[in-house]
């Protein structure tokens, strides 16, 4: 690569090349002047044959922009790429004096184009002699000179920008000029071992499980502790598998070992209502996923499906006189701090007056409600926690009916 002198070195090399070679192609151009001025000022004070070499545009070279420099960056190392540039030049010719009846300007332009046609690659020695202390000749890619075709519209816009009268010209590009980056490079130490015990990468041929369906027991819209849900999908297995239930209300997920389902491609997951269930779970909305963790291999985690865990409640009293009614409920699993709780008394929604969790983590949450101005009748009671309603239906009979244990008779 090269230093910030690279652009100037390219321009000076081209000037020297044209100044040395053009008189050899046309002996009448012995007094030729080669300048590097903008086209609107290039002719001032000059009356002899002249060629003006003007750098009018510098653009990034897309092919080299994100490439590592060969021989400088090895696998595993990172370094900012060099600044790759393409230089656009405009060659403009003038004859002698004010008039150019012998078309000397055409001879100047023809000699310049012939020189660049015969020498499309800049010579390293020419580059070194063009500008002291430049190292453009040492970059990994050589600088090539190629014609740059331009339409009438492009020429018109270009000379309008120069704010001068158009003269016969030809455009060329010089590419690629690579300027060193001075940003810090990183070269990590060699790898001594690949993971624990130098085992390298672990590859698993099997696909992760995919959950497609979740079925509740009976025609319910939620599950309760003591019941089981059925998961359906693909790549489901009970080997090294765990059904993982996650909720924002829990400090950690609840893991349950699945059982083989009755149908192919299904798993049965029992939600045990054991002594620890009151503290492990919370009523509300969950997501369930299947985690497969073979011994010594990375875990495979399925997608997640939503699950509603309904609270199990007891209601007291079940009979009361008309008027303001005080109700006491218990709820399993226990209600967590911050959960939204409502009592659905018939078609009325009532907020709790008090919620208390006993010190014994195995005991249910106790709630008290005050329902004003209750008329006579039979009222079904439900508890809604974070959008999950208790199930007030008794499925033990031939036909489902509202459970008497969740109805309050007001007389």
Image: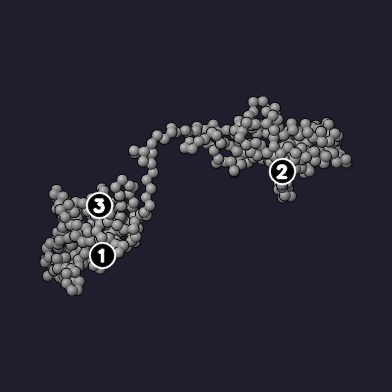
Neighbours of disc 3 within 10 Å: few (<14), some (14-19), many (20+):
some
Neighbours of disc 2 within 10 Å: few (<14), some (14-19), many (20+):
some
- Looking at the image, tell me whether mark 3 or mark 1 is earlier in sequence order: 3
Q: CA distance from mark 2 to mark 1?
A: 77 Å
- In front: label 2 or label 1: 1
Front in this rendered view, residue 111 or 72 = 72
**Could you tell me residue 3's position as x and y percent?**
60, 30
Is 360 situated above or below 128?
below
Q: Give the residue displayed 47% in from the left and 37% down from the top.
A: 76
Query: Is residue 368 shown left or right of residue 164?
Result: left
View extreme (bottom): residue: 398
Residue 64 position by quadrant: top right
Disc 1 designates what residue?
A: 262
Residue 271 visible (yes or no): yes
Disc 3 designates what residue?
A: 254
Q: CA distance from mark 3 to mark 2?
A: 71 Å
Front in this rendered view, residue 48 or 164 = 48
The N terminus appears in which quarter of the rendering? top right
Front in this rendered view, residue 345 or 404 = 404
């Amino acid at each position: 690569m090269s230093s910030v002198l690279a652009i100037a070195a390219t321009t000076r090399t081209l000037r020297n090349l044209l100044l040395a070679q053009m008189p050899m192609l046309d002996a009448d151009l012995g007094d030729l002047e080669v300048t590097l001025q903008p086209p609107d000022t290039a002719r001032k004070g000059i009356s002899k044959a002249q060629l003006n070499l003007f750098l009018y545009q510098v653009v990034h070279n897309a092919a080299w922009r994100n490439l590592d420099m060969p021989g400088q960056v090895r696998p595993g190392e990172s370094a900012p790429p060099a600044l790759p540039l393409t230089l656009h030049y405009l060659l403009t010719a003038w004859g002698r004096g004010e008039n150019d009846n012998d078309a000397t300007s055409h001879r100047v332009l023809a000699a310049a184009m012939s020189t660049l046609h015969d020498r499309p690659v800049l010579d390293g020695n020419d580059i070194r002699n063009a500008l002291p202390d430049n190292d453009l000749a040492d970059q990994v890619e050589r600088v090539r000179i190629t014609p740059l075709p331009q339409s009438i519209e492009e020429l018109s816009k270009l000379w309008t920008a120069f704010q001068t009268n158009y003269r016969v010209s030809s455009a060329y590009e010089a590419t690629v000029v690579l300027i060193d980056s001075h940003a810090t490079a990183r070269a990590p130490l060699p790898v001594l071992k690949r993971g624990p015990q130098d085992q390298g990468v672990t590859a698993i041929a099997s696909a992760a499980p995919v959950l497609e369906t979740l079925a509740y027991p009976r025609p319910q819209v939620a599950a309760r502790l003591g019941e089981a849900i059925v998961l359906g999908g693909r790549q489901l297995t009970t080997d090294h598998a765990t059904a993982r239930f996650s909720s924002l209300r829990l400090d950690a997920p609840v893991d349950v070992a699945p059982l083989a389902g009755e149908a192919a491609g299904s798993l049965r997951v029992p939600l045990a209502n054991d002594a620890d269930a009151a503290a492990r779970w919370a009523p509300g909305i969950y997501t369930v996923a299947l985690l497969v963790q073979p011994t010594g291999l990375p875990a495979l985690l399925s997608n997640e499906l939503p699950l509603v865990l309904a609270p199990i409640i007891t209601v007291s009293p079940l009979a009361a006189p008309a008027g303001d009614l005080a109700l006491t409920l218990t709820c399993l699993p226990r209600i967590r701090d911050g959960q939204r709780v409502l009592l659905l008394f018939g078609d009325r929604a009532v907020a709790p007056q008090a919620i208390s969790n006993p010190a014994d983590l195995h005991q249910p949450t106790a709630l008290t409600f005050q329902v004003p101005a209750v008329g006579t009748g039979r009222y079904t009671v439900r508890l809604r926690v974070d959008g999950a309603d208790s199930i007030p239906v008794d499925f033990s009979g031939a036909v489902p009916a509202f459970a008497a244990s969740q109805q309050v008779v007001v007389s």
